[in-house]
Image (cartoon, rainbow, N blue to C red):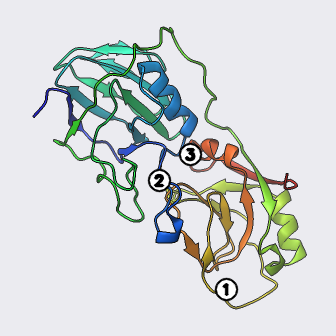
Amino acid sequence: MSDRALFVVRAGALTTVQDRGRPGHAHLGVPRSGALDGPAAALANRLVGNRPEAAVLETTLNGCALRPRSTVTVAVTGAPCPVAVDGRPAAWAAPVHVPAGALLTVGAAVSGVRSYVAVSGGVAVEPVLGSRSTDLLSGLGPPPLTDGAILPLGSPAMLPTLVDTAPQPAPPGELLLRVVLGPRHDWFTPEAVRDFTTRAFRVSSASNRIGLRTEGPALERRLGGELPSEGMVLGAVQVPPDGRPVVFLADHPTTGGYPVIGVVREPDLPAAAQAVPGTPVRFLAVRRR
């Protein structure tokens, strides 16, 4: 095997390979997938000199530990966390030199949920439908990392960016999601629609890459019954029978039968990826452009 590879010493709670996803396959029942916090993943790639489409690692809450077989440059972005090389503290959100055989430790998130680890050359697992992303719903792409796994790396494309640290948004203390009402808001009572756009919800601990689940007021329906399955889009806010809104994220199903009360604007979704359980959530109704 090539020495351009990473040995996974500790996989962490949920670490997956992600890139910009595989949009355009909804008609086949294939979700979009890709990094939940796209700007953070893109920044990590820029810091190590990778092309924008290079695959990175997305960690969840407690990081991971990796040992490269050759000397690499890495950058960790997204949720702030301690970074160390062979036990010595290293920079977060900046290029870090990791010698061959050294242990890179990405620690638990200090705030936020997901950190992104870019390695010079990118993670070069086999692409599926044009993407290397792990899709937890369909099972496409590589499986989540396990201890002892070996990940191939591509060849470095460019020199790392010369910065001391790169600014990026802090994980949200309150998650404000701009939402365009519809297409099924008329399935809910006027009071429920008002509650949806004026009252506070909280991020549920049941949230995952498929959807951000909320706790809070239950939204009462005006119409009973169920819809025939219809297409779902990124950011759709589906309301299941318990009345608590679910915001669909990158691994969402492509169809569904529960009514969609609104759709969150895509630029607001990276913050949703970093909202820890208990974070207040507010939905702000806006007009379609």
Front residue of this view, candidates 61 and 157:
157
Pointer 3 residue: 273
Earlier in the chain: of badge 1 and badge 2, it is 2
**Which quadrant holds residue 237?**
bottom right
When the figure is inspected, residue 14 is found, relative to residue 52, above or below; the finding is below
Name the amino acid type tagged 2. Answer: Arg
When the figure is inspected, residue 99 is found, relative to residue 215, above or below; the finding is above
Pointer 1 residue: 227
Is disc 2 placed on a helix, strand or loop?
A: loop
Looking at the rendered image, the disc whose residue lies closer to the viewer, 3 or 1, is 1
How far apart marks 3 and 1 lie (CA) works out to 28 Å
When the figure is inspected, residue 94 is found, relative to residue 119, above or below; the finding is above
Name the amino acid type tagged 3. Answer: Ala
Number of marks in picture: 3
Pointer 2 residue: 22
Q: Residue at x 50, y 41 (%)?
A: 113
Is disc 3 placed on a helix, strand or loop?
A: helix
Q: Residues within 10 Å of mark 3 (few under 14, many from 20)?
A: many
